[in-house]
C-alpha cells in the first residue's frame, strides 16, 4: 500500500472542504461556520464546569463496553449540554475539543435512548459506539489550561500562564464580571446559532 503524497492529501482535504461548504449552502447557511468567539479565560471556567461529566461518561462507556445498552435520563444532564454548546465555541483548541466531546457523548446517549425506546437495539453497533466513546473520553481528559499559552507570543511561557491564571481568578472572584461575560457570550451564540 503506497502512502499518499502531501499534494494528494491536500487535494482530498480541499475536496472535502468544498463538499461540506456545498452541504452548508444547500441548508441555507454560509459556506463556512461562524468563527469561535468564547475567550479562553471564560472557556477554562466552562471546561471546569464540564469536568464532573467526565465521570458520568466513563461510567456510561463502561456499561456500553460490557455489552449493555441502557437508557439514560439525559434531561438531568441538560446543564452539561448547555455549557458544552458554549465551550465548543471557545477560541482555545482544548476547551473547544472538551465541549464538542461532551456534546458527542450526549448525542450518543440520545441515539441509544431512541433505539431503546423504539425497540431498535439490534441496530446499534456497540463496538463502534464504544470506539467513539473512547475517543470522546480521551479528548475530554485534555487540560483546558494548555490553551493559556501561545507559542508564537514573545512573552515567556511562565508569564503567559500567570496572566491567564490571574484572569481566570479575576472572573471567578467577581461574579458580576463573570456573569456579564457569560451573558455576552450567550447573546452572541444565540445570534449565530442558526449558522452553525
Image (spheres, helix red, strand yellow):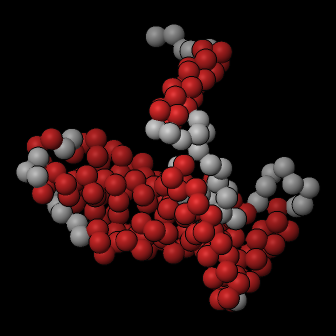
In the picture, residue 81 is in which quadrant?
bottom left
- Residue 68 visible within the image: no
Residue at 84% x, 49% y is 152
Camera-side residue of 163 and 183: 183
- Measured as percent of width and height from the top left, residue 14 is found at 60, 23
- Measured as percent of width and height from the top left, residue 50 is found at 48, 70
Above or below for 92 versus 166: above
Camera-side residue of 13 and 6: 13
In the image: residue 180, left or right of residue 18? right
Q: Most extreme residue toward the top, as rendered?
A: 2
Residue at 63% x, 59% y is 90
- Measured as percent of width and height from the top left, residue 26 is found at 47, 32
Residue at 22% x, 66% y is 72
In the image: residue 131, left or right of residue 79? left
Numbered marks: total: 0
Above or below for 115 versus 178: above
- Measured as percent of width and height from the top left, residue 163 is found at 81, 72
Camera-side residue of 8 and 155: 8
Q: Most extreme residue toward the right, as rendered?
A: 154
Q: Most extreme residue toward the front, as rendered?
A: 28
Residue at 31% x, 53% y is 108
Amino acid at each position: 500500500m503506497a502512502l499518499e503524497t502531501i499534494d494528494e492529501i491536500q487535494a482530498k482535504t480541499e475536496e472535502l472542504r468544498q463538499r461540506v461548504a456545498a452541504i452548508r449552502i444547500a441548508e441555507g447557511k454560509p459556506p463556512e461556520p461562524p468563527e469561535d468567539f468564547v475567550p479562553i479565560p471564560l472557556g477554562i471556567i466552562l471546561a471546569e464546569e464540564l469536568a464532573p461529566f467526565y465521570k458520568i461518561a466513563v461510567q456510561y462507556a463502561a456499561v456500553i463496553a460490557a455489552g449493555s445498552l441502557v437508557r439514560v435520563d439525559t434531561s438531568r444532564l441538560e446543564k452539561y449540554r448547555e455549557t458544552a454548546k458554549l465551550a465548543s465555541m471557545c477560541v482555545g483548541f482544548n476547551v473547544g475539543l472538551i465541549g464538542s466531546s461532551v456534546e458527542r457523548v450526549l448525542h450518543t446517549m440520545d441515539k441509544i435512548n431512541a433505539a431503546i425506546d423504539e425497540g431498535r437495539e439490534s441496530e446499534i453497533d456497540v463496538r463502534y459506539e464504544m470506539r467513539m466513546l473512547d475517543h470522546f473520553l480521551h479528548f475530554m481528559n485534555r487540560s483546558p489550561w494548555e490553551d493559556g499559552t501561545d507559542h508564537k507570543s514573545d512573552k515567556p511561557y511562565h508569564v503567559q500562564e500567570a496572566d491567564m491564571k490571574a484572569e481566570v481568578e479575576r472572573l471567578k472572584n467577581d461574579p458580576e464580571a463573570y456573569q456579564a461575560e457569560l451573558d455576552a457570550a450567550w447573546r452572541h451564540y444565540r445570534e449565530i446559532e442558526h449558522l452553525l
